[in-house]
Image (cartoon, helix red, strand yellow):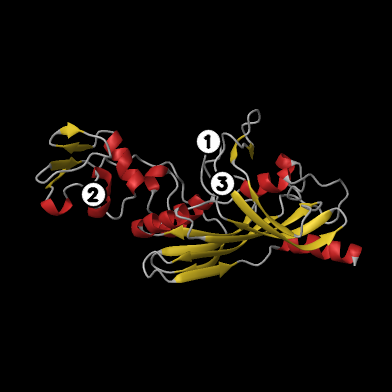
Amino acid sequence: MPELFVVTALHAGLRLDHYLVRRFPDYSRSALGRLIRAGNVLVNNSVVKAGYRIHDEDEITLRFPQPESSDLVAQPIDFGILFEDEELLVIDKPAGLVVHPADGHRCDTLVNGLLYRYQVLPGNETGRPGIVHRLDKDTSGVMVVAKTGTALKALSESFKNRTVAKTYHAVLLRDPGKSQGTLTAAIGRHPVNRKKMAVRINSGRYAVTHWKVLTRWPGFSFVEVGLETGRTHQIRVHMASLGSPVAGDVLYGGRIREGFDPPVKRQLLHASTLCFPHPISKQNMQFTASLPEDMQRVLLQLEKRYS
């Protein structure tokens, strides 16, 4: 059934989408914007834009479409849990685990595992229930997952507003040149290889990466990386642009020579620490995931070889 309500003088002058967010706090502004664009929101029986300024006594009709049947399959998927409460879940994602289903990869993802554990999560209509941010398949480490609509909205806003601190560790081929530095370079889709991203000064999106070299060896370095932005493949693209791709990252030039022991089967990149305000209490929360065994073995071998 459609919902019908009348604007009062208290809210007159607000944008339509801002008003709906106040009235339906479990829905994000982008989700409500999609409803407006799809014609599911009428003002005085007329379709209007999200930026329409509402007036006293405007009649608003809103229809939430029936959710489409999801073909997402609940599956038991192994992942470590660092923290959980009623609003959110913080996990330690293993390398090799895809975060959400996509074309050609509908099963065996983190989302499938989350549905097996919780059955119902916010954001199911997007095909990415509970997902606030993502890590690449072969990147390991800390992720936060929303368990309620309120948490999904608040955490998404935190990432959008850059009130989330993210620290990564990586093994690089070669050395970025300085002991520490900051790279500000826009990132966009590669002009030829659509599977890749690239530094695109004139057409990309603003991206900032900070790095600090922790240890150097001949041909390798171990670095700590902080992100101000969260662009697709950001660390991988920025480090490669400095001539020091993430070790094992074949897509961006990080292939390791044959015979290296121990074998490297993925990019050696780990999301170590995530710090964010709790969506309800607003208390600052910080979580850390230890380096996975494959990265520890590589570091141990480099220490043995060059100590």
The residue that label 1 is drawn on is 103
* Lower position in the chain sequence, tag 1 or tag 3: 1
- Label 2–label 1 contact, CB within 8 A: no
Q: Residue furthest top?
A: 192
* Lower position in the chain sequence, tag 2 or tag 3: 2
Q: Quadrant of the C terminus?
A: bottom right
Which residue: 12% across, 36% down? 44
Q: Tell me the mark number nearer the camera, choosing from 2 and 1.
A: 2
Which residue: 71% across, 40% down? 251
Quarter of image, res 288 = bottom right
Query: Is residue 79 something one can see in this rendering?
Result: no
Q: Is residue 94 left or right of residue 172?
A: left
Which residue: 9% across, 45% down? 57
Which of these two is toward me, 27 or 175? 175
**Does 83 appear above or below 217?**
below
Per the model, the C-alpha gap separating discs 2 and 1 is: 35 Å
Which of these two is toward me, 183 or 294? 183
Q: Residues within 10 Å of mark 1 (few under 14, many from 20)?
A: few
Per the model, the C-alpha gap separating discs 2 and 3 is: 30 Å
Q: Secondary structure at mark 2?
A: helix
The residue that label 3 is drawn on is 231
Q: Quadrant of the N terminus?
A: top left
The residue that label 2 is drawn on is 19
Per the model, the C-alpha gap separating discs 1 and 3 is: 21 Å
Q: Is residue 273 left or right of residue 176?
A: left
In the rendered image, residue 244, in percent from the top left (x then y), is placed at 76, 48
Which of these two is toward me, 158 or 129? 158
Check disc 3 and give the amino acid type. Answer: Arg
